[in-house]
Amino acid sequence: MTQAQAPTELHAGSTAVLVIDFQNEYYTGRMPIPNGKEALKKAKQVVGFAHQNKMPVYFVRHVGAADGPLFAEGSVNAEFHQDLQPLDTDFVINKATPSSFVGTNLDQQLKEKGIKTLIITGLMTHMCVSTTARDAVPMGYEVIIAEDATATRDLANWDGSVVDHITLQRAAIAGVADVFADIKTTQAIVDMPVIR
């Protein structure tokens, strides 16, 4: 990150994990993500790390119209993937836009808990992950993205070409790393000292 110093430690009382859109739509639905299972496994590690250190975990899910083509409310595709489910002690936020903040009370919940640092995992990197990171910074949060706990899909371009998911992932991460987030691997995050 060019404009902020990268954090070297985490404070359990002021750090939260966001788990964005690990939903069936990206696994068995209309928008499959080629390396989505690998990202899910890494996100599960980050969630386990948060639970172990008593950090709050927020599971965010996109919910579309019940008769809509994607993430239809009440459908199997809108549900969280069976391998990454919230615990009773976790928090669930429903959203209708790429941002985890717009139209939700996430910011209010985080501020009430004194959260200052967000560790973000999720799908898709170029959309909901990066939008959430970009929105979080002007709200006063420090953002860390677990790069290998995020993923995206191949994307049709305006000129009829296709941007492959690996190129899109790298570009999306570079875009947020420039100003909005510190980028770390899952291993680097779970290796960070935690102040309690």
Image: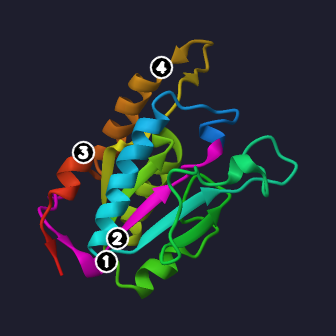
Relative to 4, residue 129 above or below: above
Where does label 3 land, which residue? Answer: 185
Q: Which residue is mark 2?
A: 51
Q: Which mark is residue 72?
A: none
Q: Distance of mark 2 from mark 4, alpha carbons?
A: 34 Å
Query: Considering depth in this image, is 38 or 156 the residue closer to the camera?
Result: 38
20 left or right of 186 in image: right
Label 3 or label 2, whichever comes before in sequence order: 2
Q: Nearer the viewer, mark 3 or mark 2?
A: 2
Dot 3 or dot 4, earlier in sequence = 4
Q: Position of residue 14 (x, y in %)?
A: 29, 78
- Side of 20 where 181 appears, left or right: left
**Element carrying mark 1:** loop
Q: Which residue is mark 1?
A: 54
Q: Residue at x 29, y 63 (%)?
A: 49
Residue at 15% x, 57% y is: 191
Of the two numbered discs 1 and 4 on the same chain, state the one appearing first in sequence: 1
Nearer the observer, disc 3 or disc 1?
A: 1
Amino acid under label 2? Answer: His
| Mark 4 lies on residue | 164
Foreground: disc 2 or disc 4:
2
Residue at coordinates 48% horizontally, 39% vertically from top-left? 126
Looking at the picture, how far across and down is residue 45, in whole percent? 33, 54
> Which three-letter amino acid code belongs to the residue tagged 3?
Thr
- Between the C-alphas of marks 3 and 4, the distance is 21 Å
| Cβ atoms at labels 2 and 1 below 8 Å apart | yes
Foreground label between 3 and 4:
3
